Image (spheres, rainbow, N blue to C red):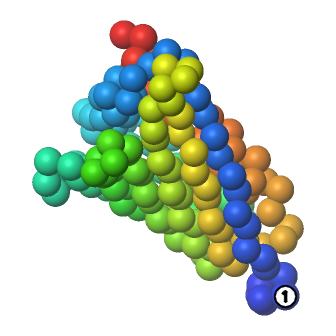
């Protein structure tokens, strides 16, 4: 079956997570530890294939992620490869951007981490923009994206606790 433009739509999935009582530096180090661990010991779903320090404020990872069952069946792909860029911004925020394409779907994730002085916590706000998502899997893509986002943040939080 051929998927036409009438059968797809664009999605904007908002994301938010708070690391209670954790500094921005702690969260940055936790994210780097998580990714470095995946470089040396591939996980069940995610493997980091390469790490490049572009400059003092920018690290680029090449990532391989196993797709969920619905995507494996729908697109006949087992995994996707993409780049993840971590940048420390001049305003002391951290930005993580990744772009992924599988089939005709293009997904771009933009996450910004800032420190909230009032709560003394680091907050991650962002979104995933999805272009050409088949309507038939819209709900699955949304739920999968939200669950994966939360799981990644919780894993980072566990590295902060170490």
Rendering quarter of residue 85: bottom left
Residue identified by numbered label 1: 6
For the point 51% across and 57% down, the residue is 110
Instruction: Tell which residue pokes out farthest to the top in this image.
Output: 162
For the point 78% across and 76% down, the residue is 9
Left or right, 117 with respect to 59, comes to right
Residue 10 appears in view: yes
The residue carrying pointer 1 sits among few (fewer than 14), some (14 to 19) or many (20 or more) residues within 10 Å by Cα, namely few
Picture coordinates of residue 125, whole percent (x, y): 57, 45
Front-most of 52 and 20?
Answer: 20
Left or right, 75 with respect to 88, comes to right
Residue 48 appears in view: no
Left or right, 43 with respect to 58, comes to right
For the point 73% across and 74% down, the residue is 10
Assign the C terminus to one quadrant of the image: top left
Picture coordinates of residue 81, whole percent (x, y): 42, 61
For the point 56% across and 21% down, the residue is 119
Tell me the SS state at disc 1: helix
Image height check: is 98 above or below 120? below
Image height check: is 7 above or below 120? below
Rendering quarter of residue 24: top left
Left or right, 130 with respect to 111, comes to right
Picture coordinates of residue 23, whole percent (x, y): 39, 23
Picture coordinates of residue 35, whole percent (x, y): 34, 37
Assign the N terminus to one quadrant of the image: bottom right
Image height check: is 16 above or below 1? above
């Amino acid at each position: 079956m051929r998927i036409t433009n009438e059968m797809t739509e664009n999605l904007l999935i908002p994301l938010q997570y708070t690391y209670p009582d954790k500094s921005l530096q702690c969260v940055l180090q936790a994210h780097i530890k998580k990714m470095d661990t995946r470089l040396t010991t591939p996980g069940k779903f995610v493997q980091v294939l390469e790490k490049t320090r572009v400059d003092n404020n920018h690290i680029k990872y090449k990532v391989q992620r196993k797709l969920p069952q619905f995507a494996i069946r729908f697109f006949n792909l087992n995994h996707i490869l993409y780049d993840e860029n971590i940048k420390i911004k001049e305003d002391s925020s951290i930005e993580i951007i990744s772009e992924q394409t599988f089939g005709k779907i293009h997904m771009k994730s933009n996450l910004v981490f800032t420190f909230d002085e009032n709560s003394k916590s680091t907050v991650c706000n962002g979104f995933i923009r999805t272009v050409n998502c088949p309507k038939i899997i819209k709900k699955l893509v949304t739920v999968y994206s939200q669950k994966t986002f939360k799981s990644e943040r919780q894993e980072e939080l566990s590295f902060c606790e170490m």
